[in-house]
Amino acid sequence: MREPWPEHVVDIEQLLRQIAGVVRRRGRQLLERYGITPPQFDALWILNRHGNLTIGELSNRLYLAYSTTTDLVDRLERAGFVVRSRDTGDRRVVLVTLQEKGAAVIEQVLDARRAYLATVLDTIDPADQGEIHKVLHILYDRMSNA
């Protein structure tokens, strides 16, 4: 029989889940203002970060099926957020390119998220804010290198 988890491990896991839930709900509300879904935002963000990608590359980065990614790109293209184009080196390859309108939406959404976080952090003592920042970095580093 497995030993019970230490209470702090259970509490930290629960708090992280609850915080993630708040961020997810708040994020959905923000995205609704721009008429995009969370997966569409993720696609725009990935294209902004990595540049032009094929549907297959984007699909892999989103952890979505190729057909689902194709539908997602179709909607983003109709909205003017991305455009498909042929690769100049290999005409068989179709690339998805972020448009200025898509980049603007990313910035607007991220600004709104940061404004919300700043409002929450303003209610916390600056020394505690620094401690939160430090501990989150430590936790992220340990988790990403595990």
Image (spheres, rainbow, N blue to C red):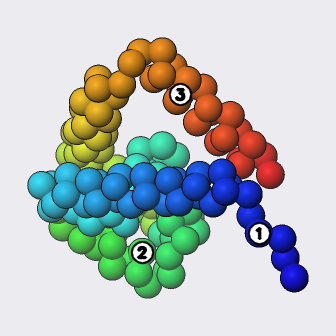
The CA span between labels 2 and 3 is: 34 Å
Residue linked to disc 3: 133
Question: Counting other residues with Cα less than 10 Å from the Cα at mark 3, is it few (<14), some (14-19), or many (20 or more)?
Answer: few
Q: Picture coordinates of residue 77 (x, y %)?
A: 25, 64
Mark 2 vs 1, N-terminal side: 1
**Three-letter amino acid code at the position of disc 1:** Pro
Residue linked to disc 1: 4
Choose between 49 and 80: the one closer to the eye: 49
Q: Picture coordinates of residue 145 (x, y %)?
A: 78, 46
Q: Residue at x 25, y 37 (%)?
A: 116
Given contact means CB atoms under 8 Å apart, are the residues at marks 1 and 3 in contact? no
Mark 1 vs 3, N-terminal side: 1
Q: Picture coordinates of residue 106 (x, y %)?
A: 29, 44
Q: Residue at x 45, y 23 (%)?
A: 129
**Three-letter amino acid code at the position of disc 3:** His
Q: Which quarter of the rendered picture does the N terminus lie within? A: bottom right
